[in-house]
Amino acid sequence: MKQMVCIVCPRGCRLTVSDEPGLSVSGNACPRGEAYGKSEATDPRRSVTATCAISGLPADIPLSFPRRIPVRTTAPIPKDEVFSLVAELMKIQKTLPVKEGQLILDKWKGTDVSVVATRSLSLPEPDDA
């Protein structure tokens, strides 16, 4: 038996997932809670948000300019694979410009899950002084 809090909606139902006999969920106020409880008990998945380094920045770029680009997965991945994906993302370096939605990592580990940029970023225009 597992106890968990449903995170599908703001209600936060306290779920009890029992596997005797079969898999049953109690404490849910809606069918989505039941589906979440069963999924979380059998195959927990997480969406991943992280950052990737930006390479090739000019030496005179201000320190206030971002050095990393935010990214996210296109679908949840198995919970026990999160750290593996983050470790891989920490090795990636992108050159500017990067566009929101741009593919950063395609079909991670042969799955249909990819990683995309969540922000557009380009080098600032030089001053016309």
Image (spheres, helix red, strand yellow):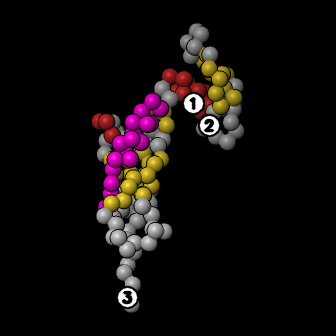
- What residue is at 49 percent from the left and 37 percent from the top? 46
- What residue is at 50 percent from the left and 29 percent from the top? 44
Q: Give the quarter of the figure containing the C terminus.
A: bottom left
Q: Position of residue 82 (x, y in %)?
A: 44, 36
* Label 3: how many Cα within 10 Å (few below 14, some 14–19, many 20+): few
Q: Position of residue 17 (x, y in %)?
A: 62, 20
- What residue is at 45 percent from the left and 30 percent from the top? 80
The residue that disc 2 covers is 7
- What residue is at 46 percent from the left and 68 percent from the top? 63
Q: Secondary structure at mark 3?
A: loop
- The reply to whether callout 2 and callout 3 are in contact (CB within 8 Å) is no
Of labels 2 and 3, earlier in sequence is 2
Q: Which residues are magenta?
A: 79-95
* Label 2: how many Cα within 10 Å (few below 14, some 14–19, many 20+): some
Under mark 1, the amino acid is Tyr
Label number found at residue 57: none
The residue that disc 3 covers is 128
Instruction: Verify whether residue 65 appears in magenta.
Output: no
Q: CA distance from mark 2 to mark 3?
A: 51 Å
Q: Residue furthest bottom?
A: 129
Q: Is residue 59 left or right of residue 9?
A: left
The image quadrant of residue 28 is: top right
Q: CA distance from mark 3 to mark 1?
A: 56 Å
Q: CA distance from mark 1 to mark 2?
A: 8 Å
Under mark 2, the amino acid is Ile
- The reply to whether callout 1 and callout 2 are in contact (CB within 8 Å) is yes
Q: Position of residue 100 (x, y in %)?
A: 41, 60
The residue that disc 1 covers is 36
